[in-house]
């Protein structure tokens, strides 16, 4: 009933329109001073970098090249924030979770999503050029999540009122993000392969167990992050592997089956693990 082409179109609708409307509407009611939290950024960055380096090291020990190691490391730390984290956490943890989500998303998009493109390009060409950084920068500028959050924060900074018809339209369109995103996830899993079970299971373990454990350690014991923000961070780290990792792997033809299997396995297992972690962090 729902072919892959329809899934792709639905995903584009959610990514470019529904999710963007939701993000803009929430961020337009926040100020940068309210959401900027240096201890939060430091804890999330340290925990994520630790697992990124661990996954990279294991790939190198298995004698994989830089390109494959970069994809595996990406699987180990980049969660499905857009299609799962944002709609679900806003419902379960409240609209105030959007601030910590934005900070974690900024680290993922600006640092790690840029890093994987750079590493793959360097591994392929044995050199780095201005064209690589230009490509990364353009990719960020074209990302609807980056655009909608930035516009929303600027809207809030200049204290511009949101006209009632515009606010109602954003509310209606943004409300489609959660059901649309969850349906798109389910539909996309139908085309995923469970091959590469051993490696995909290891990457899923990194993403669902080691990543939240690492950020929890840095948030709670090293940087003393405020409890609610720490809870959102831990839950974000417990999300399954993001679908865009597969898109990158497929685009560069670097271990796409491995990424696909990691997405499938981590998403299925996260039904249990994410539920447990959400119950834990909601007690903070």
Image (cartoon, grey):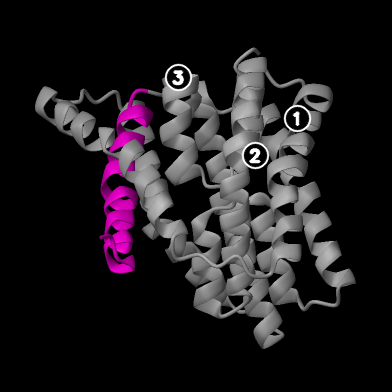
Query: Which of the labelled discs sits on residue 94, or is there none?
Result: 3
Q: Write down the residue under mark 2.
A: 237
Q: Position of residue 51 (x, y in %)?
A: 78, 49
Q: Main secondary structure of the magenta part?
A: helix
Q: Are marks 1 and 2 in contact (CB under 8 Å)?
A: yes
Q: Residues within 10 Å of mark 1 (few under 14, many from 20)?
A: many
Q: Write down the residue under mark 1.
A: 216
Q: Earlier in the sequence, mark 1 or mark 2?
A: 1
Left or right: residue 191 versus residue 132 is left
Q: Secondary structure at mark 2?
A: helix
Query: Which of the labelled discs sits on residue 45, or is there none?
Result: none
Left or right: residue 32 versus residue 219 is left
Q: Residue at x 55, y 36 (%)?
A: 103
Q: Earlier in the sequence, mark 3 or mark 1?
A: 3
Q: Residues within 10 Å of mark 3 (few under 14, many from 20)?
A: few
Q: Position of residue 135 (x, y in %)?
A: 48, 71
Label 3, label 1: how many angstroms apart (C-alpha)? 20 Å
Magenta range is 1-29
Label 2, label 3: how many angstroms apart (C-alpha)? 18 Å
Q: Residue at x 66, y 24 (%)?
A: 230
Nearer to us in this view, 24 or 263: 263
- Up the image or down, 69 lies above or below 167; here it is below
Left or right: residue 38 versus residue 94 is right
**Farthest-out residue, bottom:** 125
Q: Position of residue 112 (x, y in %)?
A: 63, 55
Q: Residues within 10 Å of mark 2 (few under 14, many from 20)?
A: many
């Amino acid at each position: 009933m729902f072919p892959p082409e329809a899934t792709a179109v639905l995903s584009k609708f959610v990514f470019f329109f529904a999710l963007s409307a939701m993000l803009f509407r929430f961020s337009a009611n926040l100020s940068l001073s309210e959401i900027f939290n240096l201890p939060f950024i430091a804890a999330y960055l340290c925990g994520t970098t630790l697992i990124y380096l661990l996954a990279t090291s294991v790939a190198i020990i298995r004698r994989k090249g830089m390109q494959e190691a970069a994809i595996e490391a990406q699987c180990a730390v980049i969660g499905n924030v857009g299609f799962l984290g944002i709609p679900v956490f806003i419902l379960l943890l409240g609209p105030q979770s959007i601030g910590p989500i934005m900070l974690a998303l900024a680290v993922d998009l600006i640092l790690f999503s840029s890093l994987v493109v750079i590493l793959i390009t360097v591994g392929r060409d044995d050199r780095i050029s201005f064209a690589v950084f230009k490509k990364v920068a353009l990719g960020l500028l074209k990302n609807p999540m980056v655009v909608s959050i930035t516009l929303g924060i600027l809207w809030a900074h200049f204290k511009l009122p949101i006209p009632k018809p515009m606010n109602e339209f954003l509310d209606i369109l943004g409300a489609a993000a959660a059901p649309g995103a969850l349906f798109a996830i389910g539909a996309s899993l139908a085309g995923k392969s469970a091959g590469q079970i051993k490696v995909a299971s290891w990457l899923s373990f990194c993403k669902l167990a080691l990543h939240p454990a690492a950020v929890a350690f840095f948030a709670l014991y090293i940087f003393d992050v405020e409890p609610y923000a720490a809870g959102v961070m831990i839950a974000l780290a417990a999300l399954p592997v993001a679908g865009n990792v597969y898109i990158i792997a497929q685009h560069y033809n670097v271990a796409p089956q491995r990424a696909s299997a990691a997405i499938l396995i981590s998403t299925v297992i996260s039904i249990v693990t994410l539920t447990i972690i959400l119950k834990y962090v909601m007690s903070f």
